[in-house]
Image (cartoon, rainbow, N blue to C red):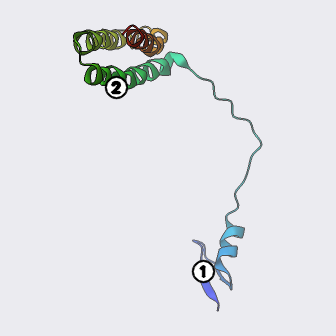
Amino acid sequence: MQVRLEIGCEDCVTSSNPLSLLRNRYKIVHTTRKVVVKLNLKQSGSWIGMSGIAVVFFLYGYSAFVLRDVFSIVVLPLIWIVIFVLGCAWFMKYPYRVLLLPVVAIGVWFTAMLSR
């Protein structure tokens, strides 16, 4: 069986295996050039920190549902709100501090859970 395959140019090619024709026509070029990507925490640190604060929210919310005492229902969410407001206030000015806020939030939550 012969297939006529036109590849966007004026010449038409006849081949019994059109896939081999495409493989030969469009070759993938591999380069050995190293690409060095530097982590720029001044630009991405705030976004990473705020994402971490959003994840920590679930720990604080879970504690309020499971423990059902005044500390877990009132105090822990207030602490999370303070951490979130700090993250919003420091978002552009202090990206490194925002990056550390989720770590502080997890430390506060872990300490609160162990003190029960």
56 vs 96, left or right, is: left
49 vs 84, left or right, is: right
Which percent across, then down, holds residue 112? 38, 9
**Residue 34: which quarter of the image?**
top right
Which percent across, then down, holds residue 36? 68, 30
| Disc 2: which residue | 58
Q: In which quadrant will I find the N terminus?
A: bottom right
* Image vertical order of residue 57 relative to residue 94, above or below: below
**Residue 49: which quarter of the image?**
top left
Q: Residue at x 46, y 8 (%)?
A: 97
Label disc, if present, on residue 42 of the rendered structure: none
| Disc 1: which residue | 5
Residue nearer the viewer, 60 or 94: 60
Do residues under tags 2 and 1 come within 8 Å of each other at their CB atoms? no
**Crowd rating for badge 2 (residues with CA inside 10 Å; few <14, some 14–19, many 20+):** few
Residue nearer the viewer, 106 or 98: 106
Q: In which quadrant will I find the C terminus?
A: top left
Callout in the foreground (2, 1): 2
Question: Which circle's residue, 2 or 1, is located before the other in the chain?
Answer: 1
Mark 1 secondary-structure assignment: strand
**Crowd rating for badge 1 (residues with CA inside 10 Å; few <14, some 14–19, many 20+):** some
Mark 2 secondary-structure assignment: helix
Q: Amino acid at mark 2?
A: Phe
* Image vertical order of residue 11 relative to residue 55, above or below: below
User: Which residue is outermost to the bottom?
Assistant: 1
